Amino acid sequence: MTMKPKDFETSLKKLEEIVKELEEGELTLEQSLERYEKGIGLARFCSTKLEEAEKRIEMLQKDEQGELRRDADGKVLQTPLDFEKEKP
C-alpha cells in the first residue's frame, strides 16, 4: 500500500533521501525500481504543491480588475507583505 505524502517539506526531504540512495548505487534492481516509483510520486506531489502556491501568490498580486499589477516597464510589481495591517 502506498502512503499519501503529508506535506511539501516532508515529501521533498524524502525525495532527497531517495535520490541519495539511488546515486549511491548499492540497491538491487528491484529496490531501485521501488525507490524510483516512490520518488516519481513524491516529485509529482511537490510539483503540484508548488503550482498551487504559485497560483495563490499570483492571486495576491492582482488588482481590483483581476490583472497582475505591473510597473512602467511591464514587469510584475512585487507586493510587500505588511503584517502590521493584520494586527488588531
Image (spheres, helix red, strand yellow):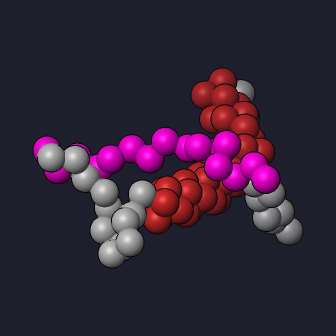
32 falls in the magenta region: no
Q: Quadrant of residue 29?
A: top right
Residue at 86% across, 68% down:
1
Residue at 77% across, 58% down:
5
Magenta segment main secondary structure: loop
Left or right position of 52 against 16: left
Left or right position of 2 against 19: right
Left or right position of 37 against 57: right
- Residue positioned most to the top: 24
- Residue positioned most to the left: 73
Residue in front for this viewpoint, 49 or 74: 74
Residue in front for this viewpoint, 33 or 60: 60
Q: Which stretch did the figure color magenta?
A: 73-88
- Residue positioned most to the front: 88
Q: Residue 8: in sight, yes or no? A: yes
Image spot of residue 35 (x, y percent): 70, 47
- Residue positioned most to the bottom: 65
Image spot of residue 22 (x, y percent): 64, 34
84 falls in the magenta region: yes
Image spot of residue 78 (x, y percent): 39, 44
Left or right position of 48 against 75: right
Q: Residue 11: in sight, yes or no? A: no
Residue at 60% across, 58% down:
49
Q: Quadrant of residue 69?
A: bottom left
- All told, the count of numbered labels is 0
Image spot of residue 40 (x, y percent): 60, 55
Q: Quadrant of residue 47?
A: bottom right
Residue in front for this viewpoint, 50 or 42: 50
Residue at 61% across, 28% down:
23
